[in-house]
Image (cartoon, rainbow, N blue to C red):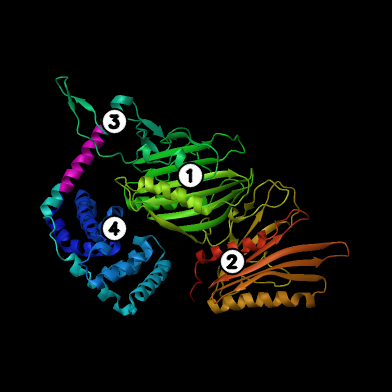
Amino acid sequence: MRNPDEFDAFYKDARDRLLLQTYALTGDLPAARAAVRDSFVVAWHHWRKVSRLKDPEAWARPHAWSHAQRRHTARLWHRDKGLDPEVRATLEALAKLPVTQRKILLLAQLSTVSMTDLAREVGLPRVEAEQQLQTASAQFAVQRGVPTTSIRSLFEALRTQVGEGRWPRATIIRRAGAARRRTHTAVGAVAAVAALVLTGSLVFDAAGLRPTLDRGNASSTAATTNAGGSTSARPKAEPEALPDTAMLTGRQLAHVVRGPGWRVEETSDNTKGDGLVLPCQQERYADPRGTAALLRTFSTSHQKPPARSEAYQATEVSQSEKAAAKTYDRALTWYAGCLDSRVQLLSTHRVDRLGDQATLLVLQAWRQPATMVVGVARTGALTTTTLVRAPGTAAPDPGRATDLLGAAVDNLCHLPDGGACSRRPRLAAAPPVPVGQVPGMLGEIDLPPVTGVIRPWVGTEPRKAVSNVAATNCDRADFSASGISNNLTRAFVIPGAKLPDEFGLTETVGSMPAPRAHAFVEQVRSRMTACPDKDLGTDVTLIAHQTSKTTDLSVWHVTTQISDKTSVEFLMGIVRDGTAVAQVGFVPSGKVTMAAGAFPALVHRALERLPALPPPAKG
């Protein structure tokens, strides 16, 4: 049973707070008021679920914010001559902040959510959310010319602007929510009956029983037959959760991706075959419990395999935004930890101001050289992935890939389950997504190719670092000493390539208190510097070096003379991030080696992965 008294109390208690927050976010009072009202209509629709939440207001707020952002007309306060100058200045300063920072600042100042819940609501790790809050507070204070301690009072002044006006009675909100629920139920029942009557069957797949999602070009209105055999008009249904018109078109693709004659090859619900269509895709659906899914493939008309460029878009609708966030993470992991043979992750980019979450990845396939640019984004309960695969190793244009992902999100964000649209997206370099058995260590996805070998790298299982095979005879770094925790080591080899046993790549990692970690790296550096003087047959060349308060990176090329005609080469790097240290070693074999600059880049990737290593054990 839904409890109307409980809902009415929630409505009266939360509506003014949500209105203040939504107005501060957009500066558009009519859009904010309508969005808050609609969020309570949706809340009553889902009240059975919402009422059981610890904080129903935190459920309603994202709906109000996303609806207001879609509706509002930019900077209405510029045209309101009666607006208080202080309020106008506050809205202007807020508008200059990126949307994510604006949301974080408003949550911190105008809500009672904890920092952990705040970070979860904006979709950032807690540490990054705290950094963004500090930045937003500082920038806002500078714009308004006040100390950060005065920010709250400026926001409180906005209450005078939103305090006027009347709210619909709670009973009206509940009636609208009930009508919405009945419409959804009726549409669902009609669609289910129509699917059974018209197709006479259901589609089965490995994930279980699923009705086909391909609705074709059916009209939004239809005739129904009553018991007497006559027909009557059926009420117009709500828009489809995922119509095929919301997918990218060949023209949109051609506008942002270079290539002749892009055209749509096929659009389906991906229920045929094994469902593994995109490179790196691991399952048919990222959300097997989703309510709708579409897959669209594109090709170019003037190219033939294997030189042909290809493009894909996969979109899924989840049952809730919370489920969609998990869908986004799962889809992103497929590509960030691609299991396809001989695929290397080149770079990761966070995309701000694009949907509710967005990430861009650049991958290089080496079996048949091709560059893949993958974008994964979420808007409300919808998750979409765009992938463009072009032959060769030419560096892609991340801006064009961002534009493509933005077009995909803008096609979807206006759907019933959509969320934020794109708002002048901005790329920012980001660390790699933590993947693999030990996210703090390198994986096959990080490794570059070696010359003359077409077989893939294979990593051994990480094991306790009793010995450190990544060390050189010069540094003799020991990760098994007392006080070092999370000490693991693994090796990477290329089976079947007929290479000497000594060929391969190794990595050893460990956690220790920050002062000791710094001293550990300094000791390795000192020993490497002194090595040529102690061993006259060894030559040590420093080829990369950088240091900061919390990080270190050094890479050396070591050559040891075994005899007058024989020498052994070794590449070694050591990195530190706070309390985590990693050592990486590579032994080439004759001409089988990495390209110039590839090993230092790999050591830098080891540094990027280190933050995922657990902190040192206490005691």
Q: Residue furthest top?
A: 229
Q: Main secondary structure of the magenta part?
A: helix
Mark 2 sits on what residue?
509
First of labels 4, 3 by sequence position:
4
In terms of secondary structure, where does tag 3 sit?
Answer: loop
Mark 3 sits on what residue?
219
Q: Report whether residue 47 is seen.
A: yes
Mark 4 sits on what residue?
65
| Closer to the eye: label 1 or 2 | 1
- Name the foreground residue: 469 vs 276: 276
Q: Report whether residue 280 is seen.
A: no
Q: CA distance from mark 1 to mark 4?
A: 31 Å
Q: CA distance from mark 1 to mark 2?
A: 46 Å
Per the rendered image, the range of residues in magenta is 176-190
Mark 1 sits on what residue?
255
First of labels 1, 4 by sequence position:
4
| Closer to the eye: label 2 or 4 | 4
